[in-house]
Image: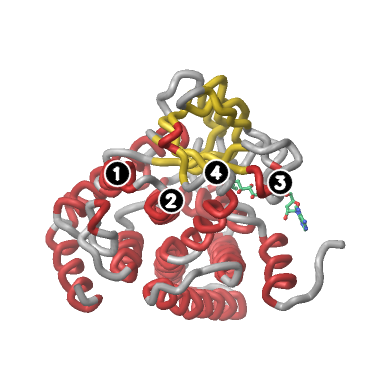
Amino acid sequence: MELDTFRSALDSWLDENEAALTDPLGGSATLDDHMAHLSTVKRLAYDAGFMRWGWPERVGGLGGSPLLRAYLGDALTSRDLVKPGIYSMTEVLAPTMIDYAEPELAATMVPRLLRGDETWCQGFSEPGTGSNLASLSCRATRAGDAWRVNGQKVWTSLAQYAARCVLLTRTGTPDSAHKGITALFVDMDSPGIVVRPIETMHGSPEFSEVFFDDVEVPLDRTLGEEGQGWAVAMDLLPYERSTALWQRAAFLGGRLQRLLETVPGGAVDPVMLGEAAQLLYALRARSRSTLRRLAAGEHLGPETSIDKVLVATAEQSVFDLVADGLGADLLVGDDPISDRWRQEFLYSRAATIYGGTGEIQRNIIARRLLDLGSDR
Ligand SMILES: Cc1cc2nc3c(=O)[nH]c(=O)nc-3n(C[C@H](O)[C@H](O)[C@H](O)COP(=O)(O)OP(=O)(O)OC[C@H]3O[C@@H](n4cnc5c(N)ncnc54)[C@H](O)[C@@H]3O)c2cc1C
């Protein structure tokens, strides 16, 4: 399907079904409510076909360009029908699963994620391993027809809701670095997994600690080959920085617009407004070209670190403007609207951490794109 045809069909469908797609709890919804509502929206969009366009037919999709998926995320977030962070997990995890899982496994599992029957999580970070991902120590050892996993992950977004986890494990020697990592697709209800949610500073338990104690994972749940986990991780990160970032930019544009409508007379600092607007524009332009490259079948790589720096900078700039414009309401406003702005402001501080920190992205840009030397 052509993008223009998809857009007009989707826009009409969204107009006609707005009531069913809008979260009835609005500003007072909890994370549980947002997750339940996300499942409803995905199910409705899947049944109407929109959630299937842009995904390969072999995993229940209807084919077509990833631009179709990007526009769906854009429309759902701009219309405030889903929360961008929780919606984006599909864009982050499904493409790599499709690239690396056994075809039958992908054909069974991906439709469940697209249809909103399941949530998945990403088990990469550990208490001693974040930026230096290659040093991870959660161990998987061979035990007959299965892997046996022992260790801990942390900051695992939505783990308490997840039915599956894309998990990075150490299968080589402790010092095998990126060569000794294997990716597994783990059922979160396997015996030996304990999930402990962590409350974020914006008051929502969006991520968790996850403990693995002798957890058995069948060998056919290996993503790629043994020792190929680093390639899986490197495949996933650019997806996190393409379609998912496009819809985050749409969300930021919507919130900037809402701020101008909220502040009396639109009286915000004009210099800060100009800066936020130009950063958002740069993000949209950059993200558009990344999406076009993805749609043309190009391999995305370290250059997507530029997109990550831009989204983090734009997000913090927009919410600095929110703080300036709303003043005391942002700090102490005791109503659902102020509460939402406050949560979003606090969450924006994480933009330079999640998905790779600002410092690490700048290191990658310096070393891998600009050839400005190494650590040593
Ligand atoms: C909202 C949110 C959601 C997240 N969701 C997930 C998830 O679903 N799954 C998952 O696996 N992880 C998730 N994370 C974790 C995230 O990927 C890590 O927090 C991030 O990679 C940084 O790792 P760290 O926290 O261990 O910090 P560290 O790596 O310990 O870094 C601490 C500080 O040191 C700086 N630093 C480190 N090394 C260098 C260097 N070589 N040069 C310059 N500066 C350096 C960093 O930039 C940072 O400022 C999430 C994090 C957040 C905030």
Q: Amino acid at mark 2?
A: Tyr
Q: Is residue 331 visible?
A: no
- Report the disc number at residue 202: 4
Q: Amino acid at mark 1?
A: Glu
Q: Considering the numbered disc 3 on the image, is that residue within a helix, a strand or a loop? A: helix
Quadrant housing the N terminus:
bottom left
Q: Please report contact status of discs 3 and 4: CB closer than 8 Å, yes or no.
A: no
Q: Which residue is mark 3?
A: 177
Q: Amino acid at mark 3?
A: Ala
Q: Which numbered disc flags the more N-terminal residue, 1 or 4?
A: 1
On the picture, is 97 further left or further right than 195? Answer: left
Marks 1 and 2, how far apart in space?
Answer: 11 Å
Q: Which residue is mark 1?
A: 104
Q: Please report contact status of discs 4 and 2: CB closer than 8 Å, yes or no.
A: no
Q: Is residue 241 above or below residue 156?
A: below
Q: Is residue 262 above or below residue 296?
A: above
Marks 3 and 4, how far apart in space?
Answer: 34 Å
